[in-house]
Image (spheres, rainbow, N blue to C red):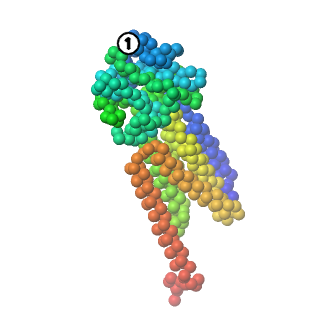
Amino acid sequence: MASSGSWSLALRFACRLYVILALVLDSKISVVADDDSNVPGVNSAGVGGGASELCDNELGSFMPPPYGNLSEIVCRPVWNTFVLRYSQTEDHVMNIILSAVYTTGWVGLGFSKDGMMVGSSAMVGWVNRKGQARIKQYFLQGSKVSQVIPDKGELPLTGIPASLVLHGPRIYLAFQLKFPTHLARQPIILAIGSGYPKHHHLTKHNDKTTILFDFSAGSASEAPTNFGQMKKNHGILAIFGWGLIIPVGAIVPRYFKHKDPLWYYLHALIQFVGFVIGLAAVVLGQQLYTKIGANFPTHRAIGIFVLVLSILQILAFFLRPNKDAKIRKYWNWYHHWLGRFAVFFATVNILLGIKIGAAGNDWKIGYGFLLGVILLSVIVLEALARMRRTEKDALPSNFQMNPVQ
């Protein structure tokens, strides 16, 4: 059985891991500013007097109903010359009016689930060369211009027609949405393009930004400019920790036990390194969840489940019975199958993460190649192990390599 010292060490380690896990699950990183000072480009829109002049425009003199006669409307400069007006009713109906200085091209406002452009839905408006106003919903299926699909999207538009008005130097896009719940913090994408859409297909944007806007407080903050890099780092850490190092560590005890006790120390060291890197991936994923609202319940739940399995495996290391202990075979079953479940669900979660993150073919090919190499290595090592066992069983029990004469 495990000694009392091992139990004490395992208990201390479990307490520390509990604290780490609690911090991971309950971490809250505030990204919503108390005012508009952190929003990029607000100063250029004119905070103070300039912002007051922009928000004092009487919409009723040029905007059609219901946008021209809204009550309790909130007005905030958000980026460069962009100004966002909105009102939200108790039944979760939201009227949005976006304005910006306009010369040519198009202006757009997108709603994103995770702060990324891909997968978002946007309302885009422009005035064509004939002076005709156009406003449409678009679905950003991919990063290429050809993947921006007109008349598609997931915005909950109501039956009230969207409207576009050119008034003085500014263009106004107005539309109405109805959400199932009260809209609060929401990543929104603001973009502008100087080229006219061709057959309703947008030209490439000249400039864009992503901000986190709190519709319940009327405040905004700059979305992390490196959120795309954060997602990449999260994926890289997960692949290296859960997808490479942990499987390699699991291979060692199965195929290298004849290198005793080297295999044991290699197994423990490799698995611990993999756990640390995997834990870093979970922490970074939690930061993405709290910073940009990247809410993918299945991916998050599987990630936490794999982390818990890994913590149990580390605890098992400290509670490892002696070889001659009666419960050793049960401990072996527990340790082996828990490890297999952890590797399996980690693989599933990596594939799921690549899919929901719209990582692209490079990630799919890269991880597919890595997974193929691991599987091929297991097949080769399994074949060699079986050959060694077969050769060993074929030798006579009284056979001696160097019999004494």
In front: 191, or 248?
191
Residue at x 47% of width, y 23% of height: 96
Query: Whole-percent x and y of residue 289?
Result: 52, 36
**Residue 353 appears in the rendering:** yes
Extreme-right residue of the structure: 326
Image quarter for residue 162? top left
Q: Residue at the location (36% across, 19% down)?
A: 166
What residue sits 54% from the left and 75% below the top? Answer: 389
Quarter the N terminus occupies? bottom right
Q: Is residue 223 above or below residue 88?
A: below
Kindly state the secondary structure of the residue where label 1 is placed. Answer: helix
Residue at image coords 32%, 17%: 169
Q: Quadrant of residue 138?
A: top left
**Where, by quadrant of the figure, is residue 182 drawn?**
top right
Task: Name the outermost residue toward the bottom.
Answer: 405
Seen from the viewer's position, the closer of residues 397 and 133 is 133
The answer to whether residue 287 is visible is no
Q: In the rendered structure, which amino acid carries the disc numbered 1?
A: Gly
Percent across and percent down for residue 14 are 63, 45
Rendered location of residue 388, percent (x, y): 51, 74
> Does 14 appear above or below 135?
below
Mark 1 crowdedness (10 Å alpha carbons): few <14, some 14-19, many ≥20? some
The percent position of residue 50, horizontal first and vertical second, equals: 38, 12
Classify 328 as above or below 77: below
Tell me how many marks there are: 1
Q: Which residue is mark 1?
A: 50
Q: Nearer the viewer, residue 359 or 195?
A: 195
